[in-house]
Image: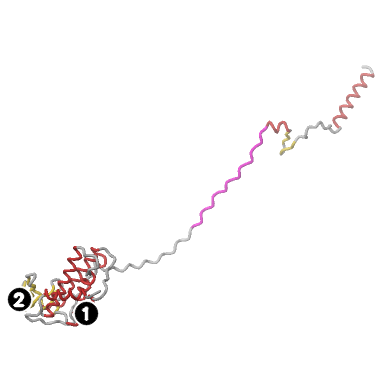
Amino acid sequence: MDQTAAAKIDASAALESRAETSAPLSTGNPSPKRVGTKTRTPETARAEPETAAPAPRAEAPKPAEEAPAPEPKQAAKPAAARPVNQVEGPRHPPSRVPSAAETYVAGDYVVYPTHGVGIVQRIAVEEIAGHRLELIHITFEENRMTLRVPVAKARSAGLRKLASRKGFDEAMAVLRGKARIKRTMWSRRAQEYEAKINSGDPVAIAEVVRDLHRNAAQPDQSFSERQIYEAAMDRLAAELAAIDRTDKATAAQKLADFLKTVT
């Protein structure tokens, strides 16, 4: 090989080594990016999809805190038992029971709660079911009925003598009062009125007459109201007739005239 060719080879080798040691010239392309330990160029970055960020780790549910045990409740007090009359039916007014045992003789006018005014016919000792009992024979002329009441049970049965004049005046004073009609169904009020009539108490019976009485300017009574009203008037008239020693028709007219004066 001649000297000229050898010189060219040395010159080209020197140029190549200088190119490797010198800094590369900027060609306008951005420098490669370093992601982690792997170098990616913009071309490879576009070609390779980016990995999604890892989802956050779901925390394990915390054990539920134990709720405090409820405090023991105090036992409820048992409700007081209500009277049967307050639920099943109207409250029956007590009849007028004499404070002491009364003695009866033949010819006395007496009042039995459920039958009204009667006359004592006789008092005799009779044997019933092997027992000797002293019985009061009471006759109710209108009903054509005779009732026998043991003397020992007369007071508890509600049997009584006629009301005194002062006691009957209290019943007449009730008739002057204002009607007190409850706002309940008629069937319930009718039961209460019948209970008052059967109590035998003239004051309670006068309350029925007062509540059901109608003046000329007031509306007429219904059929059932009229029946109860007449039954109460009949009881009052019968006792007033026995007190005044007159007949029932006269006593009933006296009551009717008295009610006309009531405003």
Residue appearing at x 94%, y 17% in the figure: 2
Image quarter for residue 243? Answer: bottom left
Q: Is residue 153 visible?
A: no
Q: Is residue 11 visible?
A: yes
For the record, the magenta segment spans 48-66
Q: Are marks 2 and 1 in contact (CB under 8 Å)?
A: no
Could you tell whether 26 is left or right of 208 in the image? right
> Is 39 above or below relative to 246?
above
SS of the residue under disc 1: helix
> Is 10 above or below relative to 201?
above
Residue type, mark 2 in image = Glu
**Which residue in the protein does label 2 denote?**
126
Q: Which mark is residue 63?
A: none
Which is more toward the observer, 183 or 200? 183
Q: Is residue 63 magenta?
A: yes
SS of the residue under disc 2: strand
Q: Main secondary structure of the magenta part?
A: loop
Q: Earlier in the sequence, mark 2 or mark 1?
A: 2
Which is more toward the observer, 122 or 178? 178
Classed neighbour count for the residue bearing mark 1: other residues with Cα under 10 Å, few (<14), some (14–19), many (≥20) = few
x and y percent of residue 252 in the render? 14, 74
Residue appearing at x 19%, y 63% in the figure: 224
**Which residue in the protein does label 1 denote?**
170
Could you tell whether 191 is left or right of 110 in the image? right
Could you tell whether 242 is left or right of 18 in the image? left
Q: Is residue 232 magenta?
A: no
